[in-house]
Image (cartoon, helix red, strand yellow):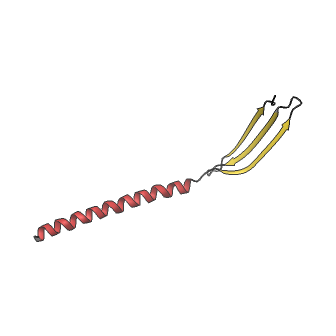
Amino acid sequence: MTPEARVQSRERKNKMKNRIIVNCVATSALAFSFLLVGCDRQISKTESSSVNRDGAVKTEEKTVTKAPDGTVTKTEESKTTPPNK
């Protein structure tokens, strides 16, 4: 192997190492950004059920969540299940 071929081989290896390092840094930065964003945090959750005279079950669910930016969201959900006949 000639000295010139050795130098070219070393340069090629260094370029490959640099690409791998750049890819690892970019992937780490992307993963870290997802960790910083986070998820909504549930502050409270209330569920209540009641049975009507006709046998229908009414269920109410209230949820309060807080986003990472400080925004508070209140969600109310109501379901009515018909009686079994």
Taking the view exactly as shown, the residue that stands out farthest to the front is: 85
> Picture coordinates of residue 3 (x, y %)?
12, 71
* Residue drawn at (50%, 55%) of the image: 33
Is residue 77 toward the left or the right of residue 1 in the image? right
> For the point 75% across and 48% down, which residue is it?
45
Residue at image x 22%, y 63%? 12
Q: Is residue 3 left or right of residue 19?
A: left
Relative to 49, is 25 on the left or the right?
left
Q: Give the residue at the far right of this rendering.
A: 53
66 is higher (above) or lower (below) than 60: below
Quarter of the image holding residue 5? bottom left
Instruction: Give percent across and percent down for residue 62.
Output: 75, 42
Of 1 and 10, the residue lying toward us = 1
Residue 83 lies in what quarter of the image?
top right
Identified at 35% across, 60% down, the residue is 22
16 relative to 64, above or below:
below
The x, y position of residue 66, in whole percent, is 67, 49
Q: Quadrant of the C terminus?
A: top right
Is residue 24 toward the left or the right of residue 7 in the image?
right
In which quadrant of the rendered image does the N terminus lie? bottom left
Q: Quick check: 50 above or below 4?
A: above
Q: Count the labels in the image.
A: 0
